[in-house]
Image (cartoon, rainbow, N blue to C red):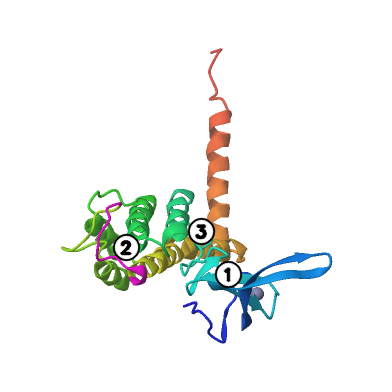
């Protein structure tokens, strides 16, 4: 959590956990001759200077207003494009409207589950099918808690008053973890398999198969002898 005036926090510019210098903003006029006039400090507006990258953050009434800051994680590498679009849209608004972000994230989850090949329109059935096919049961339990499935489920895209920042952040993380456990894991296994020397038995089987195919082709090419003269 990014807290106003804490001694150290993750700088939104360089993402380094470092110290920040806090400065008040003054009202006044400056010309080439120096200070012309001074009208005191600007109330409630403070800036923090990062000791690592020297960039500044601007805070109004103890809330960061620059740069745009989101507690939500970035989408994971293998997230499908359609899912990612909604994920990023939710990321933009989560700090101001966690309820709207949660509605978008449930839509993202629905899109992801469809992308994973689940045809059932009922999300609970679709998630159960994924669990039957090897997905950790913990996903099912977590989706129950954040009301994606179950008797208290909120329909994807629908605003619900109970959704808060904590629920939205859990939904962001669940989406990322679901992508990693399915798409990323499958991609990594495929990459590993293709990088491995093929097993002898597999090689031999393929060689035999090739031989068989060639023999069949040869038989098909040789014309059957026909008796033209008797
Ligand atoms: Zn920095």
Instruction: Determine the secondary structure under disc 1.
Output: strand
Instruction: Determine the secondary structure under disc 2.
Output: loop
Circles 1 and 3: CB distance less than 8 Å? no
Segment colored magenta: 157-166
Cα gap from disc 2 to disc 3, whole angstroms: 20 Å
Q: Nearer the viewer, mark 2 or mark 3?
A: 3
- In front: 180, or 204? 180
Q: Could you say where residue 90 lies in the image, as x and y percent from the top left?
A: 42, 57
Report the image quarter containing ligand 1.
bottom right
* Residue 159 belongs to the span the image colors magenta: yes
According to the picture, the residue beneath numbered tag 1 turns out to be: 58
According to the picture, the residue beneath numbered tag 2 turns out to be: 133
Position of 72 with respect to 24 (left or right) is left
Give the crowd class for mark 3: few <14, some 14-19, many >=20 residues within 10 Å. some
- In front: 132, or 199? 132
Asked whether residue 183 is in view, the answer is: yes
* Residue 210 belongs to the span the image colors magenta: no
In percent of the image, x 45 and y 60: which residue is there?
91
Q: Earlier in the sequence, mark 2 or mark 3?
A: 3
Position of 9 with respect to 115 (left or right) is right
According to the picture, the residue beneath numbered tag 3 turns out to be: 78
Give the main secondary structure of the magenta stretch: loop
Does any atom of ligand 1 lie closer than 8 Å to the CB of label 3? no
Cα gap from disc 2 to disc 1, whole angstroms: 49 Å
In percent of the image, x 37 and y 59: which residue is there?
101
- In front: 121, or 128? 121
């Amino acid at each position: 959590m990014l807290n106003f005036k804490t001694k150290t926090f993750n700088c939104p510019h360089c993402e380094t956990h470092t110290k920040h210098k806090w400065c008040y903003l003054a009202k006044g006029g400056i010309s080439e001759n120096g200070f012309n006039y001074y009208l005191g400090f600007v109330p409630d507006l403070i800036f923090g200077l990062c000791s690592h990258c020297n960039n500044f953050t601007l805070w109004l009434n103890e809330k960061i207003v620059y740069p745009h800051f989101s507690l939500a994680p970035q989408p994971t590498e293998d997230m499908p494009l359609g899912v990612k679009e909604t994920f990023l849209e939710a990321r933009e608004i989560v700090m101001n409207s966690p309820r709207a972000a949660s509605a978008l994230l449930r839509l993202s989850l629905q899109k992801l589950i469809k992308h994973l090949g689940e045809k059932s329109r009922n999300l609970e059935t679709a998630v159960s099918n994924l669990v039957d096919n090897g997905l950790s049961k913990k996903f099912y339990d977590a989706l129950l808690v954040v009301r994606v499935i179950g008797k208290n489920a909120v329909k994807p895209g629908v605003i619900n008053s109970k959704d808060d920042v904590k629920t939205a952040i859990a939904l962001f993380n669940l989406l990322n973890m679901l992508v990693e456990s399915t798409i990323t894991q499958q991609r990594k296994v495929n990459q590993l398999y293709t990088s491995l020397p093929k097993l002898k038995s597999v090689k031999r089987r393929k060689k035999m198969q090739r031989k068989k195919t060639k023999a069949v082709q040869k038989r098909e090419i040789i014309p059957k002898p026909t008796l033209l003269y008797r």
